[in-house]
Structure formats: structure tokens, C-alpha cells
Amino acid sequence: VVRISSSSSNSSSSSIKINPCECARSRRHLLVGNHVPSVPWRCSRSLRCLPMKAHQSSSPQLSFDTSLSEVSQAIGFTQDRLELKCGPNGRGLFAKRRLNEGDTILAVPLSLCILAEREEAIHIPGVPWGEHANVEKLKRTKACRDAYVLPWPIRSAVALLDLADGGGGRFWEEYTCHENGLLPAPEEYSMPLMLPDDLLDMLADATCVETTREERSQLCQLLGEVDSVERRGALWAAACVRSRNFALTDELFAVAPFLDMANHAAQPNAEVGTQATAIARLKGVPTGNLQIVATRPIEAGDEVTISYGPNMTNEQLFARYGFTMSPPPPRDAVEFAAVLNAEYLRELAEAGQAPPRPPLRLNQHAFVEANGASDAESWAPESDAVLRAAMESLPLDEADTSSELELELNNARELLEEAMIRLDGAVDPDVDETWLDEHNDGDDVRLYACVAYRSRRTRVWLRLRSLLETYVSQLEGKKREEGCSSSSS
């Protein structure tokens, strides 16, 4: 959980958290050949009230300016700072004029947001908690409330579907459903949850595929008793909530229009905060604003960016938002299933539900020394992002102590075996990178995102395999030497 605090010179602000979605990953290659084919997705069914055209079509600028100006005027905020246009990171927010550190760039009233408590209540714009049963247009939300308490992301997704049908008034109906609607259409999302099977399998990531299909199944199961929730619409709404929510507190979450269009950067120039009294429970219509505040000067024409989380990895960014970064994030890493399983077994052992097992750890000093360096920092400089990601992925014990040789060797072999499995049939990342360079301006954004994800995580696994092979070889040599010494004595 990453805290994002806001600091405005004109108001007191509270901290906001963005909750990264963390998923375990493994690898499976399903693409044959040295080229990456184009895999178009043609929808067999239309979805009422969702924007089916690309959001660059017609005039998204007009829709953005008009809608945001109306919202800003309602709270006395002059909208002369931002414009929506396409840039290097796709569609994003750009400064119309120079902005100073501490300037409030964008403000949206909380009353216009979907607000959901973790446990039960939800605020739908124009309809406070407690009045849903009296609003006929909120048929899905009413059905959820009458049937059972759903997790807050699902409740928010159901509310978004009702808003798309006009249950919250003209603003949200246009924001989601207008021909130039400002939310992405289903076929514009690149996150695994929304990928067609062709692209999902092309990720060559068996655990990602399995996790995604389980999520889809659970979503349909949770909404099985709710009338008028079509599968594709439910997935779209869930994707919107997953990629566009802000945590106001540990127990309260918001889906906020306009703020959700700010792109991520490793070194952002703005942050999200609240100008409001802390909200503990949803009682009546919430007051105050959500806002984007400049953290340093921003020149006219520069993109306004925020951080989705400073410690998020490429795997996490792709799972939640559908993109990866190059160069990789500062704390990039991949996850070993063996490490996760060992941690789970340790927790069971502590609870008396399983026999104790030794920790799955490697001696950092011995590991670095085996790979030809004296210390980790000098060996893995910032310029070698792939090596740093590999080191971040390994369960290294920083304490300079030597564990039992047999245990160290078994742990290293277990990790090496998993790395080799994940690379079974992997596509050469250089081939993928060549394709990415040739299709940088292509129209198929989702295909590009999938190839980039595959290429960037493959490089990390290749480096891990090489490092572990070197370490295992050295440990096996030491074991043979110990065996010879024992025989001689």
C-alpha cells in the first residue's frame, strides 16, 4: 500500500493511498515463430451504453473541456489549467499554462464520485446511501443490496453500470456512454482481465492466464444473482474500478472522474489529495473535493503525471493498468512461486497446521561473490536495470552468515528449476524488442502492451537463470570438495 500525500498552499490535505494489485506469475510460451502476428478482436456482441469507438475519434477534446468546465464552475474552480490530448504515454492531461509547485491543477467534488466503504455502504452520485431502494434506475445496485454484501470493488462496478444507464444523471451517462465518452471502451483496455483469449495466451504466462480466468469466474459468480448484468459489461466495469480507484482511507475508496486520466510516471510532477474533512462513514452527501496538486513547476505543454505507486513492478502495473515501463520501475522484480509457497507453509507451521520447514533463502554475500563481485551495490548499478530487478526478485539474506551447504544448494536448485520452467519455449526478447521498435506507432495498443510485457519480464528471468546456474555450479563444486576432504580424512 503506497501513500500519496498532497500538499496545497491553499488548503489542508489528507493522504490518499493507491492499492497495487499484486499477483503471482509463472511462464508458458504459446507463440510459435520469430514474428509477432496481429491479433484483432472483433466483438460478437454489442454492449448497450458503453462507448464502442476509440476515444480519439471525433472530438474528445470538446467532450473533456465541456464536461470539466461544468463541474469546475459548480465548485467555483476555474478550468484554465488542463487539456486532454494524446502524448508519448497515450491520452493524458497536459498543462495549458505554467503551473507552480503547490498549485491545485484539477478539483472534482466528492459528491460526483462513486464512494464505497469496504464493508457495506456505497455513495452513488446524486443518490446517498440509504436512498438506493427508492431509485428505480439503480436496479442493479438495489439487487445487490437486497441480496448480499459484495466486496467494495464489485459494488462500485455495479454502481458504474447503473450510472452508465443514466441512474446518476446526465454527467455520468455522458462520461461513460456518450459517443465521445471519456472512459475507455472494453476493447481499449490492455489489462489481463479484459484481454481476449488470443492475447491472453500470447503473454506466455501460465499463472497470469490461470489467475485471470479465475477472477472472471469469481466475478460472474458474485454477480450471478444480480439481474441485468451482462458478462462483458461486468468485466468492463470491474476493469474501470480496478484501474481508476483511489483509497481515501483504509476503509473508503473512490472512483473519481477526470483524475483517472492522469498517467503514471516514475518521477511524477503532481500528486492526488483531498480538500475535505476526513470521511469515516458515508452519511448523506459527502462534501469537499478530490484534487491534483503540482509537486514542482510544470511548464505549459508538459504532461501532468502522478505516481500509481513508487514500488510497483512491471508485473503489477500490467495486472492492474495494462502497461509496463521501459526502463523498468526502480523496484522492478518478478515473483517466484516457490518463495510464495514457502512463506505460506511457514505461516501454516507457525499456526501449528503444518510441519516446520527451513526458510527458502539464499546467502547474499555468497551469491554475489559467486557471480564475481564483492558487494551487491557495486555489482548491480542503477544503469543495469535488468540485473537490479533480478536481484530484487531473489530471496537474499543480507546477513553475512553461511548457512548449511546442503540447504543452500537445495534452495538454489529449487529456484533455478522454476526459472527454467518459466523460460521453457520463451520468445527471444531481442526479437520482441525489434517488433516493438517497428510497431511503435501502430494502432493495436493492446497487442503492443502484451509483447512489451512478455519481452521485459523474459529478460529478468533470463538473467535469473544465468545467475542461479553460476551459483548452483559453485555450490556443487564446494560439495564435491567437501566430499573429497571427508574421504581423505
Image (cartoon, rainbow, N blue to C red):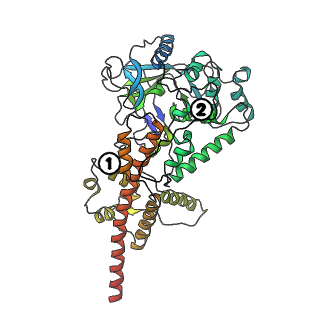
Q: Is residue 73 above or below residue 193?
A: above
Picture coordinates of residue 148, whole percent (x, y): 72, 36
Q: Which disc, if any, is residue 71?
A: none
Distance from disc 1 to disc 2, alpha carbons, whole Å, reads 35 Å
- The residue positioned 51% from the left and 60% from the top of the image is 342
Q: Is residue 482 above or below residue 301?
A: below
Asked if one can make out residue 331 in the rendered structure from this viewpoint, the answer is no
Q: Is residue 52 left or right of residue 455?
A: right
Q: Secondary structure at mark 1?
A: helix
Q: Which residue is mark 1?
A: 385
Asked if one can make out residue 272 in the rendered structure from this viewpoint, the answer is yes
Picture coordinates of residue 311, whole percent (x, y): 41, 42
Report the number of numbered marks: 2
Q: Which disc, if any, is residue 237?
A: 2
Q: Amino acid at mark 1?
A: Ala
424 or 268: nearer the viewer: 424
Disc 1 crowd, CA 10 A, few/some/many (<14, 14-19, 20+): some
Q: Is residue 421 above or below residue 269?
A: below
- The residue positioned 71% from the left and 38% from the top of the image is 224
Picture coordinates of residue 469, whole percent (x, y): 36, 66
Q: Amino acid at mark 2?
A: Ala
